Image (tube, grey):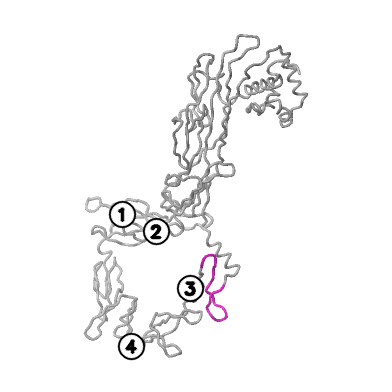
Amino acid sequence: SMLQLSFLLLCSFAAVALSTAGRTAQDCTIGDQWTENFIRFECYQGTGLVVKGVRANGCVPTNKDGGALIQPGTTFDEKYFTYSCSKSGDVVSYQIINCRDSTGEKLVVGETRTMADGSSWKCFKDSTGAIKLSQETQGGCIYDGKVYTTGRSWRQPEDFKVTVAGVVRSIGNAVQMTCRSAGASGYTAQATGCVTTAGKTLSNGGFATVDSLNVKCLIASDGTVTMSVVDESDVTCSFNGTIIKNGEKYTSNNGDVYSCIFGVSSKTSCAFKIGDETHTLNRNSNAYINGKYYSCNSGSGMVDFGQITGCTLPDGSLKNFYSTWTNGTEVNRCRYTVSGATITTYIEIIGCDYNSKTVGRNSLEIIGKDVKKCAFVDGLWRMRNLTTAEYTAYIKSQSTGGSSNVFGGSGGSGSGGDITAKPTTTTTTKPTPTTTKTIVKTSTVVPSTTTRAPVPLTGSPAVVPSRSTLSPTSFITTKDTEAPVTFPITTAPGQCHDLFEMCSTLAPICYDRNNASLSNLNKIIKNMNVTVDQIKEIFKIMGIDK
């Protein structure tokens, strides 16, 4: 009908008016190429009625004019996501198809993976359907891409060399670092030892032998770590006027065995005879020999317990030293003390019996969601539920002080347009269809990355980096808007630009030609808040009868 054809013509005007985003065929130079919304566009020479046009050729991951082009049908891996460059008709799109974990492995939507460092990576879709990646990491120090919680250590490469007799020799290859809590400042990495070329870790002030050289590890208060070669005299010992070389042993008259270890002599064992047999007990060890009890401690000589062999219970039974047993709700152990020549035995309560398991005094036992404590209640050690304060402290202790990050991706889509030659007739005609597509600009955010520098030896803070949540880009595909097949040309009293204000109101309908029917006109007018009088005014400008 006349009304329907006139409305479709109005939609064509609206499409032309909106075709202003990006560079269009009207304002481009043939041969030019540029990048918008991660899509590479080209201005090309047309043929036939097409004077020139703009077309989308592929995707540019860097979103820069000089960036490398990837062809439709291929994928591209970035740090956190895998992108697909696809083409449908003449519309090219660049969008996320899956996530990637910390090692670069594929992580599909809906999948969660726990990494070797304890971090959890999850690929999911948010409420808008955009693919995102979440990372949950325990709090601690970061080194070489891994997170180390409080108390955990790692080795940081460091070459320690010395010159001996004019020859340069390597004596160490790393520093041991340990993560420490720094309170409100987060975490700090602290040097706690040296690592020799043989792989042995030395604490501050510790010694080792490396290729016949005696070396020492020193850590200064400012965190500076050094390894040096020491003289033989620095690692020898003197015992009762006798010089003992490093690594050698010396037995005293009472059977105590001493060892010289890098300049420090210490008792390492006890040697004693029972009859014609010689026995040896290491320091701080005990043994029953022929039914009698013997102990070697740091004191002089070996302790012979004589007739004392354990703890006597009220019922007359005997328990061996260090044996344990259950007494009601409590777990007991037989112990002793040695003071000079006096040996005293006693029974120690070491904890509570809970399901045939020993729970240490004031310790917690966790079974599923049930948390109980071994506590002193009414004169006895027994298991009980946690108080409110204890439970609150327990919940707080389970917090790692870690971080949770969510990463979003970027992307875009676009198509081209062209310019056609104007018809030369001025009567009713069938014009060449004009395809006009809008290049939809979308805001994009490129994922940020954090450069993780090696942990300094000076113990400066090293905390889990925070990353901003990145908003996903909307992927919008435009539709072609065709000119009507035929329409009457009349003399319009107004000008073409007089239609643009009303066209901008009706423009959204123009992207769906099926809505531009007479049966839907009332609904369109209602939805777009356009009155019948306004439609009549448009028709009047266009010179169309009611």
Image vertical order of residue 127 relative to residue 65, above or below? below
Image vertical order of residue 17 relative to residue 164, above or below? above
Number of residues whose C-alpha sits closer than 10 Å to that of mark 3, classed few (under 14), some (14–19) or many (20 or more): many
Residue range corresponding to the magenta coloring: 366-384
Give the overall secondary structure of the magenta segment. Answer: strand
Number of residues whose C-alpha sits closer than 10 Å to that of mark 1, classed few (under 14), some (14–19) or many (20 or more): many
Image vertical order of residue 204 relative to residue 319, above or below? above
Badge 2 amino acid: Thr
Q: Of circles 3 and 2, which is in front? A: 3
Badge 1 amino acid: Gly
Seen at 39% across and 54% down, the residue is 224
Q: Mark 1: which secondary structure? A: strand
**Outermost residue, right side:** 533
Q: Quadrant of residue 13?
A: top right
Q: Position of residue 460 (x, y in %)?
A: 46, 52
Circle nearer the N terminus (1, 4): 1
Q: Is residue 453 magenta?
A: no
Give whichever of 546, 503 is nearer the camera. Answer: 546
Badge 4 amino acid: Gly
Residue that mark 4 sits on: 306
Q: Mark 3: which secondary structure? A: strand
Circle nearer the N terminus (3, 4): 4
Residue that mark 1 sits on: 172
Residue that mark 3 sits on: 359
Q: Position of residue 421 (x, y in %)?
A: 57, 13
Seen at 45% across and 90% down, the residue is 315
Q: Of circles 2 and 4, which is in front? A: 4
- Residue 165 in the figure: left or right of residue 86: left
